[in-house]
């Protein structure tokens, strides 16, 4: 991908003819009556716009902002103004290099090529077409990584560029620490800067998003940046001074952290709000030729094409539901649209159709099994079902005690046989034993919890509870078969590796504990236990549920969720894992799905909200604001 040159540039003669009139200086001081920041921020801003101040400016003070390349703020006009008023060899060398590099007009900012390229990577990813530019993106990020490791000023000195580079590099597996972000650890770094003077919301958003790519609770750099950037964003919202076009973006980012965003929903939102005028960085507003229009056209075409495919997949799932007779189960939640949405929203490319189908089928089947063991079946039916699962291929040795058990078991058994056969074609080996093992473990743990509820048993420790609760949330039977279908080979050694098992474990912990936080009130009423209840009982000391003990317990569980989520993210994005990256991402995708499902309420109790999200991905047409190239 060749990033086109800036199309918004200034004539070379304008660069060396800054105004020095008192009227211009007074006007410069008045253009931002609501500016923020500190005295230092104002000084930085006035240095940044020195070309409008002439002899009124303290040029010796301005030169304190000179960069290694000789420029002031990478701004040709500001540097030229300084060179007129105070002799400086390095400034003249910088201007001379511009004359050599450009025959005529020069950019408003130079160099800013890296920022432009990072914006392009972000745009391609945010609109869902980055897979078409994998090599070009890799080249750009390799360059950004070299600049990061060499502490290049173009990348490190600008808050927005540095934060964007940090986020993209970490999410693409580059091994970088947060030390490069340490310069922004205090809020004063923003307040004392040009960005602070301008109340630069875009830069705050970049810092806030970068702070979320945190792999350890001990990373105080990112913790602090996230804390103060979120506080300032909330303050900007409450001040009612943000432009109407920016408010939705700020509200959205504060409500939905990166771990609770689903790609296809993001893509649709970004495509519909796409602006084709290009990127903006302080005094330079510039576009990149027709590239943005072409990106929009490609993104729209790709989204519409896959949306048609998702609709075909939904019809397939509905036929499958009827064929295996899940629609005959009056006690069960059978929602193919919801399960396909959770698959398509994260595994969106057209070529992952088989993976989406398998994800959707086993999501439905684990839900139906949960309904049978939780409330839909008698004790006899539950025990019969578990015995059948344990026998698996030898299930014919046991009779079905009811039609409901027969329907549920046959649907699980036959469907997973079909999924395993498809996965075998990809892997060139049988993976049926692994799938069987996952189902057997999950169902046994579900049965254990059912017995706990019947016998009013309370696990003695959190360790005892989690030993059962991790597998009883049954994410393994959904995710692990899908990992075999996304493309790369997974050997038996790899799926038994510590890395693979830790990803499965942390994913399951995130899902289980999120569910516990949202359902503890319901569980108390039905006499069941979960992690919140166990911790609250421990803190109360008298076997009762005090409100204070409940709140302490919930906070402890939330911290455990955060720790497992961070560890999972670290395992998924690191560059040296033994599990192929596409397979690792399936675990992260599931973590994001359960995070958004349990963001506010138990999603199965709020079908209206989930239905709206599902329709947005699978049915609702795009409403594109910007005109498409060649459109009538």
Image (cartoon, helix red, strand yellow):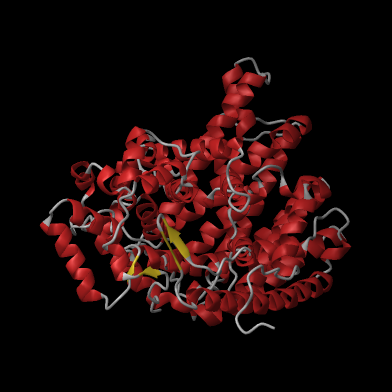
Q: Is residue 72 above or below residue 407?
A: above
Q: Is residue 199 left or right of residue 397?
A: left
Depth order, front residue of 421/621: 621
Place of residue 45 in the rendered image (x, y in percent of width and height, measured from the top left)? 35, 44
Depth order, front residue of 43/372: 43
- What residue is shown at x 80% (from left), y 55% (from top)? 333
Q: In which quadrant of the rendered image does the N terminus lie?
A: bottom left
Q: Is residue 1 above or below residue 280?
A: below
Q: In which quadrant of the rendered image does the C terminus lie?
A: bottom right
- What residue is shown at x 69% (from left), y 78% (from top)? 309
- What residue is shown at x 70% (from left), y 57% (from top)? 366
Place of residue 318 in the rendered image (x, y in percent of width and height, measured from the top left)? 80, 71
Depth order, front residue of 488/462: 488
Q: Is residue 396 in view from this perspective? A: no
Q: Is residue 457 above or below residue 543?
A: below
Q: Is residue 489 in view from this perspective? A: yes
Q: Is residue 89 left or right of residue 243?
A: left
Query: Residue 118 is drawn in which quadrant?
Result: bottom left
């Amino acid at each position: 991908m060749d990033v086109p040159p800036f199309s918004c540039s200034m004539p070379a003669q304008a660069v060396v003819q800054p105004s020095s009139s008192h009227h211009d200086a007074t006007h410069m001081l008045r253009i931002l009556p609501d500016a923020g920041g500190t005295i230092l921020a104002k000084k930085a801003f006035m240095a940044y716009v020195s070309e409008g101040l002439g002899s009124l400016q303290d040029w010796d003070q301005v030169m304190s902002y000179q960069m290694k390349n000789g420029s002031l703020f990478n701004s040709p006009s500001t540097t030229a103004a300084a060179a007129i008023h105070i002799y400086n060899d390095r400034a003249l060398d910088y201007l001379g290099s511009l004359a050599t590099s450009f025959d005529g007009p020069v950019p408003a900012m130079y160099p800013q090529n890296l920022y432009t390229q990072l914006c392009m990577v972000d745009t391609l990813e945010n609109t869902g077409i980055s897979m078409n530019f994998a090599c070009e993106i890799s080249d750009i990020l390799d360059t950004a990584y070299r600049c990061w490791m060499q502490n290049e000023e173009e990348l490190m000195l600008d808050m927005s560029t540095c934060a964007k580079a940090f986020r993209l590099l970490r999410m693409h597996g580059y091994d970088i620490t947060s030390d490069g972000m340490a310069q922004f650890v205090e809020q004063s770094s923003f307040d004392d800067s040009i960005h602070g003077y301008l109340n630069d919301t875009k830069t705050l958003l970049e810092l806030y998003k970068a702070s979320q790519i945190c792999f350890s609770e001990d990373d105080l750099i990112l913790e602090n940046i996230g804390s103060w950037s979120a506080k300032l964003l909330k303050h900007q919202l409450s001040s009612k001074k943000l432009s109407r076009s920016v408010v939705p973006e700020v509200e959205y980012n504060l409500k939905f952290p990166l771990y609770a965003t689903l790609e296809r929903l993001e893509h649709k939102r970004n495509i519909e709000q796409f602006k084709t005028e290009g990127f903006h960085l302080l005094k330079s507003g510039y576009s990149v030729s027709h590239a943005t229009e072409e990106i929009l056209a490609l993104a729209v075409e790709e989204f519409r094409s896959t949306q048609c495919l998702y609709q075909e997949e939904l019809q397939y799932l509905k036929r499958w539901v009827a064929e295996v007779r899940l629609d005959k189960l009056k006690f069960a939640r059978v929602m193919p649209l919801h399960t396909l949405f959770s698959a398509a929203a994260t595994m969106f490319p057209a070529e992952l159709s088989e993976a989406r189908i398998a994800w959707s089928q086993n999501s439905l089947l684990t839900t139906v099994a949960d309904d049978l063991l939780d409330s839909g079946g008698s004790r006899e039916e539950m025990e019969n079902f578990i015995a059948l699962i344990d026998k698996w291929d030898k299930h014919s040795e046991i009779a079905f005690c009811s039609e409901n058990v027969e329907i549920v078991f046959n649907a699980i058994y036959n469907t997973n046989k079909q999924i395993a056969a498809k996965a075998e074609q990809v892997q060139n080996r049988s993976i049926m034993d692994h799938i069987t093992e996952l189902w057997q473990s999950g169902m046994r743990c579900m049965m254990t919890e059912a017995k706990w509820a019947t016998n009013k048993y309370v696990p003695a420790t959190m360790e005892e509870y989690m030993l059962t609760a991790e597998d009883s949330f049954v994410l393994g039977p959904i995710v692990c078969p899908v990992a075999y279908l996304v493309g790369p080979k997974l050997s038996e050694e790899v799926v038994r590796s510590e890395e693979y098992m830790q990803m499965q474990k942390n994913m399951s912990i995130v899902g289980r504990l999120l569910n516990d936080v949202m359902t503890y009130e319901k569980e108390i009423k039905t006499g069941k236990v979960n992690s919140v209840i166990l911790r609250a009982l421990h803190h109360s000391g008298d076997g009762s549920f005090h409100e204070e003990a409940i709140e302490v317990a919930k906070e402890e569980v939330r911290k455990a969720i955060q720790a497992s989520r961070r560890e999972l993210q670290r395992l998924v994005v690191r560059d040296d894992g033994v599990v192929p990256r596409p397979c690792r991402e399936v675990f992260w995708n599931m973590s994001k799905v359960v995070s958004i499902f349990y963001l506010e309420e138990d999603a199965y109790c709020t079908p209206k909200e989930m239905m709206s999200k599902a329709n947005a991905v699978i049915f609702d047409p795009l409403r594109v604001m910007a005109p498409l190239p060649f459109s009538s």
